[in-house]
Amino acid sequence: QVQLVESGGGVAPPGGSLRLSCAAVSGSIFKIYSMGWYRQAPGAQRELVADMHNNGRADYGDRVEGRFTISRDNAKNMAYLQMNDLKPEDTAVYYCNAGITGRASSWGQGTQVTVSP
C-alpha cells in the first residue's frame, strides 16, 4: 500500500535540464528499500533510468548514465531525478518506482518528458 506521485515533467530543448520528483506515501508496515525511475516511450519497452537503494547505491541505465542523477531523501520518502543534457531520445513517460520489502514494487502514474527544439 504505497502510493507514488510524480511531478516535474514537461518540455525541454535538447541539451536542457529537467528535475523530476516522486513522493511516496505508505499506509502499510512494509519498508521501502529502494526508489527509482523507469521510462517508456511509445512502441518501446520500459527501461531502467535510475534506481537507488536505501544505502545510497545507485544504478543507472546505459542510455542515461553520466547525464542523469538520482537522489533520495529517505526520511521524507522522496526521490528525485536530475536530468541534464537531455536528448530527443529521452522523450518518454517517466514512472517512479518503489521497492517494498516482501511485496511487489509500487508504481506511480507517470509524468511525460518531451525533449524537442
Image (tube, rainbow, N blue to C red):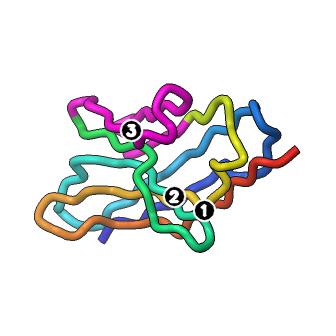
The residue type indicated by label 1 comes to: Val
- Please report whichever mark, 1 or 3, sits nearer to the chain's N-terminal start: 3
Q: Are marks 2 and 1 in contact (CB under 8 Å)?
A: yes
* Residue 70 forms part of the magenta stretch: yes
The residue pinned by badge 3 equals 60
The residue type indicated by label 2 comes to: Arg
Disc 1 to disc 3, C-alpha distance: 17 Å
Callout 3: few (<14), some (14-19), or many (20+) C-alpha neighbours within 10 Å? some
Q: Residue furthest left?
A: 102
Q: Quarter of the image containing the C terminus?
A: top right
Disc 2 to disc 1, C-alpha distance: 5 Å
Q: Nearer the viewer, residue 73 or 56?
A: 56
- Please report whichever mark, 3 or 2, sits nearer to the chain's N-terminal start: 2
| Residue stretch in magenta | 55-81
- Please report whichever mark, 2 or 1, sits nearer to the chain's N-terminal start: 2
Please give left or right for residue 13 compared with residue 106 in the image. Answer: right
The residue type indicated by label 3 comes to: Tyr
Please give left or right for residue 102 compared with residue 60 in the image. Answer: left
The kind of secondary structure element at disc 3 is strand
Disc 3 to disc 2, C-alpha distance: 12 Å
Residue 50 image position (x, y, % from top left): 41, 43
Q: Which mark is residue 35?
A: none
- Residue sitting at 26 percent across and 31 percent down? 57
The residue pinned by badge 2 equals 39
The residue pinned by badge 1 equals 93
Q: Are marks 1 and 3 in contact (CB under 8 Å)?
A: no
Residue 54 image position (x, y, % from top left): 24, 37
